[in-house]
Amino acid sequence: MDILNLEPMHIDVICRKMQTVPEKLASLLLQLELAGSIRQLSGGYYIRNFL
């Protein structure tokens, strides 16, 4: 969660920053999205929800 903010970030960039592979990251991002912590934007970009 510390990596994401209000600036949309591509999944490839998140992978590099977290030093992980997209397969593992996709599961984590889905969990965060279902919890309402982040949003997926078009084109593989993610943004943090600040509610």
Image (cartoon, helix red, strand yellow):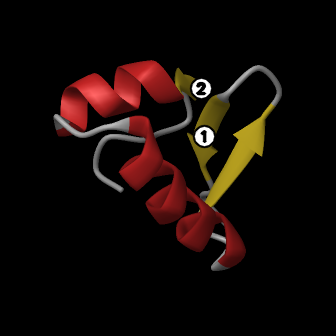
SS at circle 2:
loop
Q: Is residue 33 left or right of residue 20?
A: right
Give the quarter of the figure containing the N terminus.
Answer: bottom left
Indicate the amino acid at tag 2.
Answer: Pro
| Residue sitting at the far bottom | 35
Residue toward you, 27 or 13: 27
Q: In the rendered view, would you say 30 is above or below 4?
A: below
Residue at the (59%, 26%) spot, across then down:
8
- Could you say where residue 28 lies in the image, as x and y percent from the top left? 45, 63
Q: Is residue 5 left or right of residue 6?
A: left
SS at circle 1:
strand
Residue at the (78%, 34%) spot, across then down:
41
Q: Label 2: which residue?
A: 8
Q: Label 1: which residue?
A: 47
Q: How many marks?
A: 2
Q: In the rendered view, would you say 19 is above or below 49?
A: above
Q: Residues under labels 2 and 1: Cα distance? A: 5 Å
Indicate the amino acid at tag 1.
Answer: Ile
Marks 1 and 2: in contact by CB < 8 Å?
yes
